[in-house]
Amino acid sequence: MNNSCCKISRSLWIRALKLVPIDEIKVVIDAVIDEYEVTYKSIPQSGLGVLQTKDTAMHEPYFLGEFPIATSWVVLTDKENNTYEGAAQLMDDDENLVSLFAVCDAILANNLSSCNKLSDLVVLGEFKFAQEVRTRKAMLGSTAVDFSLLGAAEEDKENKRA
Amino acid sequence: MLKQDLLGAHIKAIWLAETQQALFNSLMQVMSRPGRLDNWEQWLENSPAYLAVLATLLDGEVSLNDVHGLLTESDWPMLQAKKSEVELANYLLCDASKMVHIQPSLGTLSSPDFSATLILKVAQLSVKQGSMNLKLTGPGINGEAQVAVSGMEQAWLENRNGWCSAFPLGIDCILVDDTQIMALPRTTRVEILEAVHNGENN
């Protein structure tokens, strides 16, 4: 059951928060973190990830290259011994940052205090992401090449020769 | 650690990279010098020594079988290792005071390194006296070494000698008590000099 104060899908929270100034997130977390004991369910780690895909000619697997990746899985325990879990996975090499986002995930997923403030930041991040997408689409659109015109030009040349 | 500063979280020493580097160095030393005992007390912070061994050696790419259920559920996500059948596991964690009939992976002739490593929890390791006195010979030992082990079924060593009889196939053993660690690589010949069962010598 989704009891989060945030209406945006959980899978999009970290992507959105990554686009918000980190200081704004830290202010929210600093205000509530003392209410909980933070422990790690698994050790926060950063390293390099590889993505395997297949080439389209021979269908042989190859690696696209390496990218930085960091993961964290936290448990927040309140004064009444209730526990709340959160996790995050980022294309970044900062374990502290990913742990901070894991705490954000725990707060948002479990509707803990300051959930609304974080939810506002998620909405802001998603707005920024939509803006970026629009900008990229516009850039792509302005550089688009209509190859069908090349075919028409060739036909014109051949017609003239004939 | 910065992580502790940021979120106030505490991570036990055995999970920190700098501790694991020191413990890995120690593991290499005891593997190279069978019969040598290293004391890990300063690193453990009340964690079991076998957990420190696993924390140092395991990651998400290897598999583990906890034969006697020594681990807690919360240990598994920290170790990240995959749970596996005994026959296929890269690492086996066993309570040496309880013998079970298992067949660990011995590797293949082309890849003897695909064999299992056994982490055996014993009651006490000592160079002086214990319920079972062992004579060790082989590579890494100047002549012979003698160690005493308490809280270990003799059958473990008898099986171990059988598993290691067709070198390069075999298994490597790491023996741990509460704070100490000792290794029996497959190249070590182990002879049981004396075993005491309920006060009777065998």
Image (cartoon, rainbow, N blue to C red):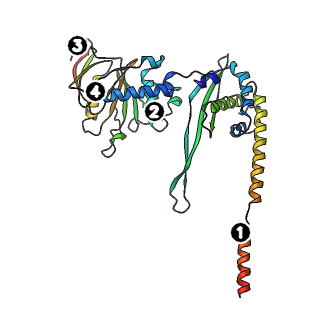
Could you classify mark 3 by the number of other residues whose Cα lies within 10 Å: few (under 14), some (14-19), or many (20 or more)? Answer: few
- With respect to residue A135, does B42 lie above or below? above
Q: Quadrant of residue B30?
A: top left
Q: How many marks?
A: 4
- Using the numbered discs, state the Cα–Cα distance from disc 1 to disc 2 in whole angstroms: 54 Å
Question: Mark 2, chain letter?
Answer: B
Mark 2 residue element: loop
The x and y percentages for residue B20 are 46, 27
Residue at 75% across, 24% down: A113
Nearer the observer, B202 or A155: A155
Distance CA(mark 3)–CA(mark 1): 92 Å
Return the x and y of residue B190 as percentages of the image width and height: 24, 27
Between discs 3 and 4, the one toward the N terminus: 4
Which quadrant of the rendered structure holds the N terminus of chain B? Answer: top right
> Badges 1 and 2: C-beta atoms under 8 Å apart?
no
Quarter where residue A155 is shown: bottom right
> Is label 3 in a helix, a strand or a loop?
strand
Q: Amino acid at mark 2?
A: Leu
Circle 3/circle 1 CB separation < 8 Å: no
Up-down relation of residue A51 to residue B18 (above or below): below
B31 horizontally vs B202: left or right: right
Judging by the rendered image, the residue that carries numbered circle 3 is: B200
Q: Please state which amino acid type lies under the numbered disc 1.
A: Phe
Mark 2 lies on residue? B58
In the image, what residue type sits under mark 4? Leu
On what subunit does the disc labeled 4 rest? B
The numbered mark at residue B157 is 4
Circle 2: is it few (<14), some (14-19), or many (20+) Cα within 10 Å? some
Residue A147 numbered tag: 1
Q: Of callouts 2 and 4, which one flags the residue occurring earlier in the amino acid sequence?
A: 2
